[in-house]
Image (cartoon, rainbow, N blue to C red):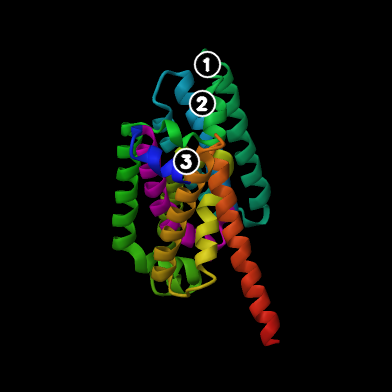
Amino acid sequence: MDEFFSALMQYNFLQSALLAGLLASIGCGLMGVYVVVKRIAFLAGGIAHCVLGGMGAALYFGFDPWLGALLAAVVAALLLGWVRMRWRVQEDLLISALWSMGMALGILFILKTPGYQADLMSYLFGNILLVSQENLWFMAALDALLILTIIAYHRQFLAVVFDEEFARLRGLPVQFFYLLLLVLIALTVVLLIQVVGLILVLALLTLPAATAGHYVRSLGAMMALAVGIGALVTVLGLAFSYGPDLPAGPTIILFAGALYLASAVRLGLQHLRRS
């Protein structure tokens, strides 16, 4: 770790990587709580995998892949949310079909785009060390949008997350706020892709929030703690991956998973002692 922190003072790319990880931790801490409490991790995973189709299409037609990711994430969120509201009986099969089609289209587009085959791994597993200044501004803007929307509609999101039927009885437009919540989750997915990639994005979205849920019950406190946990595992992942030259994304997820498992085991042992 000493090697990492001494290098951090010298190299701009490490400073950018650390800042990217901290920006990503804000998004995963805020929106991950909604995903965990509402139990819609499967939907979030579907959105994440559909994003590859948008990135691949953008590359193939000569556009910025992050613009394709953003558009695909929002469209996937609205489509998957509509499927869940209209076809609950077969929602798992329909979401699985859209999930796999998005991945397949993305891979085909990327492989047919000259010169971009090598980027496929960075989209799937992330490459935080190559984050650019433009990416940092993009991530900061997404964080700002998430924070402002949550501040404006936090009570409505609470109602939708905890009791949709009661919210309907109170006259709240539940479908609108549910779809808006999914769109915000989609933006968070795009935020996290640069850090851990599409394959591991669901883990970073849910594990810090799930760990925070072991210790606090208030949604606001859970968000704050999840942001802190996300920042911690990001710093640890970057620090421990730097010396051995390991990929940072999977290392970050290993720390997030280890922290969650340790917390879950601790809670389990406490319950055993009480019983």
Which mark is first along the chain, 1 or 2?
Answer: 2
Tell which circle, 3 or 1, labels the residue nearer the N-terminal end. Answer: 1
**How many numbered discs?**
3
Residues shaded magenta: 13-41
* Residue plotted at (52% across, 16% down): 113
Kindly check if marks 2 and 1 are in contact, taking CB atoms under 8 A apart as contact.
yes
Residue 65 image-quadrant placement? top left
Up-down relation of residue 194 to residue 77 (above or below) = above
Q: Residue at x 70, y 81 (%)?
A: 272
Residue 26, position as x, y percentages in the image? 38, 53
| Three-letter amino acid code of the residue under disc 3 | Val
| Residue matched to label 3 | 195
Q: Which residue is mark 1?
A: 113
Q: Which residue is mark 2?
A: 56
Q: Nearer the viewer, residue 109 or 241?
A: 241
Query: The disc labelled 1 sits on which kind of residue?
Result: Thr
Kind of residue sitting beneath label 2: Gly
At 39% from the left edge and 41% from the top edge, which residue is drawn?
Answer: 6
The mark found on residue 14 in the picture is none
